[in-house]
Amino acid sequence: MPERESILSTEIPQNLPLSVVAEFVGREKELQNLHQLLQDKKQLAITAIVGMGGVGKTELAIQYAKKHLQNYQGGVCWLSAQGIDVIIQILRFFELKFNRILPDDWELADKLKYCWEYWQQGEVLLVFDDINDYKKQVQPYLPPESPRFKVLLTTRQGFDRTLPQLRLDVLKSLAAMKLLKSLVDRERLKSEPWVARKICKFLGYLPLALELVGRYLDTMPDLSLEKLLKQLEKKRLEHEAIAKANPLMRYEYGVAEAFALSWEQLDEKAQSLGCWLSLYALADIPFSVETIEDDDEQELWEKAIAELRKLHLIQWQAKGIYRLHPLIRLFFQMKLDESSNAVEVKTAFVAQMVEVAKRIPQQPNREDIFNFTPHIPHLTEVATHLSQYLSDEDLIRPFTGLGWFYQGQGLYQQAEPWLRQCVKIAENRLGSEHPDIATSLNNLAALHKSTGRYSEAKPLYQQALELTKRLLGNNHPIVATSLNNVAELYRYTGRYSEAEPLFQQALELRQRLLGDKHPDVANSLNNLALLYGSTRRYSEAELLFQQALELKKHLLGDNHPDIAINLNNLAALYKSTGRYSEAEPLFQQALKLRQRLLGDNHPDIANSLNNLASLYCSTGRFNKGEPLYQQALELYKRLLGDNHPDVGTSLNNLAGLYCSTKRFSEGEPLFKQALAICERTLGVGHPDTIMVRGNYARFLREAYR
């Protein structure tokens, strides 16, 4: 047995790996937190740095040990869990650093016990790097329960809460840029700053990827950042900048190789789940196994999620909500494309997203918007990148769903590209003679009508009607819908004599094909009533409005956006005929119902505010009407833009109020704006334009007489 004696040294013994990081950035807080975790214990302190591959766990451990070397007078012993046996590494460190030779005839366990007992005085840091099996690689070799020993682990695997852990995430955006600047000429980055930020974002702010790209750029002085970004977007993980390790770096893997180490630890179910999740967009992923009815199958999926989380391959955001790092997503997609069932998986995925799209109503209420918002990025992903896997039957569903989601909120600029794309993709795949072409044309025309672009809506509605008749014959509910759409456009543009026979044909067709108790019949009754109201046939209009309201309540209940429309229309009729006491409660009911169902930022809210304000003004309550007119105008402008017929009407109404209250200097510029908008969007002969022009003329006579 060797003689017992304490071991002292003037130089702190250590075997830290060489760090070739140009500048260690963005981890100041983590270094501080790590030191605190290791110092808080009154006994053997064990702390783990955990995180996904390439996030910089090993480098953080090296930098921590270097920064706090003087705190560990007993030495810093670096142990690679992926190298030779850990116990051999410990014994070699002891013999080399403390100049001691252990007897060959001792058992390894006895040698290890001796090392711990006669280790150099002072606090000791033991770093177990890149472990994947705590019980085999760490637990048997731990030092005794003494507060002078500190154990630091780096691992991709998460532990339960009994082991203190520092979860290492990717860098913040500013730190990522700082890292890139430490590797690439600053002037070069300054010349393309926005592209540099886009590269950092594409790489998901992952330190390994940033360092690889930075070193690659340094060797390619004539390569523009914009060109590199395009190459990365095209070749992704296979681009030479990130595919292989840089020999000047301590880390021996490229990005995909680093992720592959974790991939190989997954079972088949977890690998399949990773590939499935990679098809979602780079956004929060709603994914719950609770809908799986088979308990055994549900348990398998739960285990797969747990495996992915343990290796930090997915990020848990909230219950049933997960997220993928951008480069891990690309890695899983690469693995999926390498598999034999890639087409089958992608087809199943888009079919699932189609079911979501089918549930989006044409007029979503506030609850619908809340429920569908998490799915919108993923529907967008399907429509943008996976449309080739949509069946012919479901081809237009994602595009229509996205269009309705935005249009229903008054977000017309966001809706239009999807509805245009819907027409284009349907024509390319299905040809020009297909019912879905007519549906797509109708949807795009309806958007144009909503935004006052009637001249663009008309040919689309007419094409849809002709195509529907040609494909389905004259006796079909869809033909009735097309007739109604064309008639509605004629009503909007003041062509009442052309609209009426089409409205009547649509109503008769719907009653014959669908029966009297159907929402479409109620819609036809309402539309025909609006036409009668526009042509001052008030008694006929009132009867149809009441029938439509009763039918809608019977079919849809009292809490539906359509009920608010019918209440509003009936109230408007009462106001037009001077029955103000009957109109006011209906206007108020419609406003409250819309606010509850649609929220405060919707064109229909502006419509209700405008109508109620108009009623107040008609009854001389200008002080109550003015703020409502102003709210309506602001809302219309924000949602529809400054060049919309509803903005023109709203300006006209507010100008009329100013005229009635003798505030002529405030009213005149509004009348001018209103008339210009109506003439530009509706034409000089439109009834609404004529109305505004007449109001302006009366204003001028009143103001300048």
Image (spheres, grey):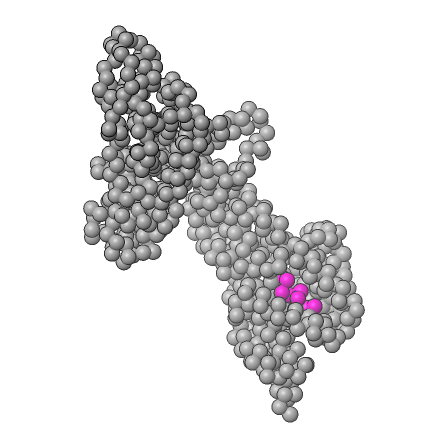
User: Is residue 470 positioned above or below 293 on the image?
Assistant: below
Q: Is residue 605 magenta?
A: yes
> In the displayed structure, does residue 32 sit left or right of residue 239?
right
Q: Main secondary structure of the magenta part?
A: helix
Relative to the observer, which residue lies in front, 247 or 560? 247
Residue at 66% across, 58% down? 595
Residue at 65% across, 70% down? 627
Give percent across and percent down for residue 432: 47, 54
Relative to the observer, which residue lies in front, 692 or 222? 222
User: Is residue 329 positioned above or below 298 on the image?
Assistant: below
The reply to whether residue 581 is in sight is yes
> In the displayed structure, does residue 501 sit left or right of residue 131?
right
> In which quadrant of the rendered image does the C terminus lie?
bottom right
Give percent across and percent down for residue 626: 66, 73
User: Is residue 351 positioned above or below 413 on the image?
Assistant: above
Q: Is residue 436 magenta?
A: no
Residue at 75% across, 67% down? 584
> In which quadrant of the rendered image does the N terminus lie?
top left
> In the displayed structure, does residue 268 sit left or right of residue 578?
left
Q: For the magenta stretch, what is the residue range? A: 604-612
Residue at 70% across, 71% down? 624
User: Is residue 202 positioned above or below 297 on the image?
Assistant: below
Which image quadrant is residue 94 in?
Answer: top left
